């Protein structure tokens, strides 16, 4: 944040893959309102069945009264299919749905979140004022599903805003490169599930997308090698809260929601 501004508390939620009956998960998400975040960012894969939208809204509960933004993940479009959970380790799921038509009520999901006041960032830019601070956003629909249209949001981020945030489900490096080049300085993504099935002492075996294993979850810089123009961004990848109902296993990879506190730069 610019010097002299108050810290900004950002709650990053991702990959709930919610189905009715996940009462513990729903109660946990609902409890997150107690953190009193200034801003909520949901990086997608929220639902895993058409009936889950009501449960999702119920889970978010008081969080919906706070400023929020969201993008979709591929699993907000396609209902989950039975698969060998370990398949995740040897191939990416990109392109798996190319022959299917979306069968989840994605539009309704977006309408409900937008009706609650959250900003839809699927191939859209937007602005929110949070505690007197203007925050400029750009987001894309999920590159993992081939739905990203960066051309629709391209262009320099608003330099008069207090903060510029780029949001995407799958942290594909080419999308992160675009955001960074346009001046977005905090990039938020999910999708990787932190590797989902990890090896203790070694970490993730795969990221299921283009990002490297070292950045499968958590905070890092993007890009890792300095650009010629010196631009750089903080990247936070959430390991997410759920899994596909057909692959309900994590190993050495805890689910998470993350509270990021953005602090002012020290005055030069
Ligand atoms: Fe996911």
Image: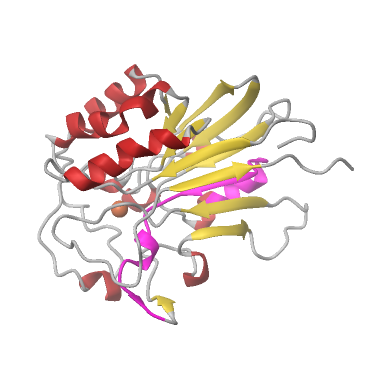
Horizontal side of residue 60 vs 127, given as left or right:
left
Q: Report x, y in % for residue 150.
A: 50, 40
Q: Report x, y in % for residue 257.
A: 40, 48
Residue 140 higher or lower than 98, as above or below: above
Residue 14 higher or lower than 117, as above or below: below
Dividing the picture into quadrants, the one containing residue 32 is top left
Front-most of residues 196 and 181: 196
What is the residue that sits farthest to the bottom in this orientation? 201
Name the residue: 29% across, 22% down: 111
Name the residue: 75% across, 35% down: 2
Name the residue: 32% across, 45% down: 73
Q: Which residues are magenta?
A: 176-200
Residue 48 in view of the camera: no
Front-most of residues 97 and 167: 167
- State the quadrant of the C terminus: top right
Q: Report x, y in % for residue 218.
A: 51, 59
- State the quadrant of the N terminus: top right
Q: Is residue 179 magenta?
A: yes
């Amino acid at each position: 944040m610019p010097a002299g501004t108050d810290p900004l508390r950002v709650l990053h939620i991702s990959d709930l893959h919610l189905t009715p009956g996940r009462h513990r998960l729903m109660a946990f998400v609902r409890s997150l309102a107690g953190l009193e975040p200034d801003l909520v960012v949901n990086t997608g894969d929220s639902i895993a069945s058409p009936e889950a939208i009501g449960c999702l809204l119920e889970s978010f509960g008081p969080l919906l009264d706070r400023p929020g933004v969201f993008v979709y993940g591929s699993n907000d479009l396609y209902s989950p299919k039975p698969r060998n959970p370990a398949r995740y380790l040897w191939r990416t799921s990109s392109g798996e749905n190319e022959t299917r038509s979306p069968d989840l009520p994605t539009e309704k999901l977006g309408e409900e979140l937008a009706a609650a006041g959250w900003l839809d960032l699927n191939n859209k830019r937007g602005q929110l004022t949070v505690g007197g601070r203007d925050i400029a956003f750009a987001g894309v629909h999920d590159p993992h599903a081939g739905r990203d249209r960066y051309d629709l949001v391209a262009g320099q981020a608003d330099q008069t805003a207090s903060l510029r945030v780029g949001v995407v489900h799958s942290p594909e490096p080419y999308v992160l490169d675009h955001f960074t080049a346009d001046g977005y300085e905090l990039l938020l993504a999910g999708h990787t599930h932190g590797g989902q099935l990890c090896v203790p002492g070694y970490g993730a075996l795969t990221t299921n997308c283009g990002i490297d294993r070292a950045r499968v979850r958590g905070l890092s810089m993007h890009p890792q090698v300095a650009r010629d123009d010196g631009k750089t961004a903080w990247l936070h990848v959430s390991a997410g809260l759920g899994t596909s109902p057909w692959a309900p296993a994590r190993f050495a990879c805890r689910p998470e929601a993350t509270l990021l506190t953005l602090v002012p730069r020290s005055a030069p």
